[in-house]
């Protein structure tokens, strides 16, 4: 399901007297026109299978990462993407891999895998090994690969939004027809730099999609308690940035909305907000017991809204057998096990690596 799409968002501004200045604001209307999404995405059986494999890879990878964290093989913070897989899969399956830019926050493992980065080097990075994508220096939150069009993993809440706007500026400056996808969460949606970025992006008509992964909780605070306007797709209205709200637990709904959004920004019409209504099954990070929500709430989401189970039923409807799906799961588990074995057997960085790739300046 997708709401607030393909319509003019008309915000009346009524004339009113300002007590101090004695001036009158003239009556006016602001018309914000966004892209139109027609129906859902009609995926072929092959595409359905591709979406299923990608989401399952993220799910099994994150489950194994959680296990390695529990064993002490992953240090520092670790934020898992379990439950939110349909958002990144539906969106990143529609972009030009390697040519468009992707940037996100600290819940970044799944986005990296979808950029085509080998699960082995992602897992090696999580465990701080020299074979990792950032040579063991980035860990869970700060992975990076320019080669694959992935510009981080960022630990500072909302920092990736302004950086993503800069990536969009670079695409426009170079004239390469690329776009930037800047993911952030419902908590980061309240950061000031987000609105500075939206203002700049609309002024310069930058090709950026601001993807709000609204998983309902900013760390431990419900979005309804933290945001006076919890319809986050409307956050750009004051800058005339259109928005849409999408069922982020349905990969086909995400893909349909993403195609419309990508066509909009690639055509030079400026930025767009996509609020993905999704849900994380685990705590904010591995250290979060998530006592701010009930077990019943999580169980209800898993049972009735799980994105992988939903597409699994769609595959069964087109003739894929349960045995075939079990074989795929076994194949994915093998890939993840090999990634974990590779990470555990890879050497740690040499102490001398502390002094490489470090920017030093005189201030």
Image (cartoon, grey):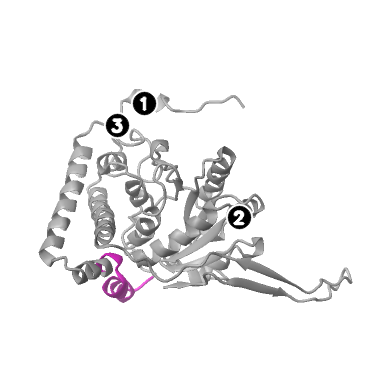
Cα gap from disc 1 to disc 2, whole angstroms:
38 Å
Image mark for residue 198: 2
Circle nearer the viewer, 3 or 2 = 2
Q: Could you tell whether 193 is left or right of 67 in the image? A: right
Of pointers 3 and 1, the one earlier in the residue sequence? 3
Asked whether 354 falls inside the magenta stretch, the response is no
Mark 3 is surrounded, within 10 Å at the Cα level, by few (under 14), some (14 to 19) or many (20 or more) other residues, namely many
Q: In the figure, 278 relative to 270: above or below?
A: below
Looking at the rendering, the stretch of residues picked out in magenta corresponds to 293-309
Mark 1 is surrounded, within 10 Å at the Cα level, by few (under 14), some (14 to 19) or many (20 or more) other residues, namely few
Circle 3 is placed at which residue position? 130
* Camera-side residue of 72 and 344: 344
State the image quarter where residue 243 is shown: bottom right
**Residue at the location (50% across, 48% down)?**
179
- Whole-percent x and y of residue 278? 39, 66
Q: Quadrant of the N terminus?
A: bottom left
Circle 1 is placed at which residue position? 353
Q: In the figure, 113 relative to 89: above or below?
A: above
């Amino acid at each position: 399901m997708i709401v607030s799409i393909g319509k003019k968002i008309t915000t009346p501004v009524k004339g009113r007297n300002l007590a101090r200045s004695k001036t009158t604001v003239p009556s006016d209307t602001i018309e914000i026109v966004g892209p139109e999404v027609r129906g859902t995405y009609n995926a072929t059986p092959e595409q359905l299978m591709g979406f299923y494999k990608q989401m399952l890879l993220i799910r099994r990878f994150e489950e194994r990462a959680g296990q390695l964290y529990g064993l002490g093989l992953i240090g520092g913070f670790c934020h898992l993407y379990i439950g939110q897989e349909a958002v990144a899969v539906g969106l990143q399956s529609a972009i030009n891999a390697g040519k468009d830019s992707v940037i996100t926050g600290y819940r970044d493992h799944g986005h990296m895998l979808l950029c085509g980065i080998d699960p082995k080097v992602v897992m090696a990075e999580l465990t701080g090994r020299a074979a990792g994508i950032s040579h063991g220096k980035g860990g869970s939150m700060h992975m990076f690969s320019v080669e694959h069009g992935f510009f981080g993993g960022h630990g500072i809440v909302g920092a990736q939004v302004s950086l993503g706007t800069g990536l969009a500026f670079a695409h426009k400056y170079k004239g390469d027809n690329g776009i930037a996808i800047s993911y952030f969460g419902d908590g980061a949606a309240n950061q000031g730099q987000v609105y500075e970025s939206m203002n700049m992006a609309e002024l310069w008509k930058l090709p950026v999609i601001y993807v709000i992964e609204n998983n309902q909780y900013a760390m431990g605070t419900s979005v309804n308690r933290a945001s006076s306007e919890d319809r986050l797709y409307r956050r750009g209205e004051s800058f005339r940035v259109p928005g849409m709200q999408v069922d982020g637990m349905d990969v086909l709904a995400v893909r349909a909305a993403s195609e419309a959004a990508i066509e909009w920004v690639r055509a030079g019409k400026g930025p767009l907000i996509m609020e993905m209504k999704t849900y994380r099954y685990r705590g904010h990070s591995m250290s979060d017991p998530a006592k701010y929500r009930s077990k019943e709430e999580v169980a209800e989401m898993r049972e009735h809204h799980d994105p992988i189970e939903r597409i699994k039923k769609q595959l069964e409807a087109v003739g894929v057998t349960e045995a075939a799906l079990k074989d795929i799961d076994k194949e994915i588990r093998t890939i993840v096990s090999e990634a974990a074995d590779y990470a555990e057997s890879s050497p740690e960085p040499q102490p001398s690596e502390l002094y490489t790739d470090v920017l030093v300046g005189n201030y």
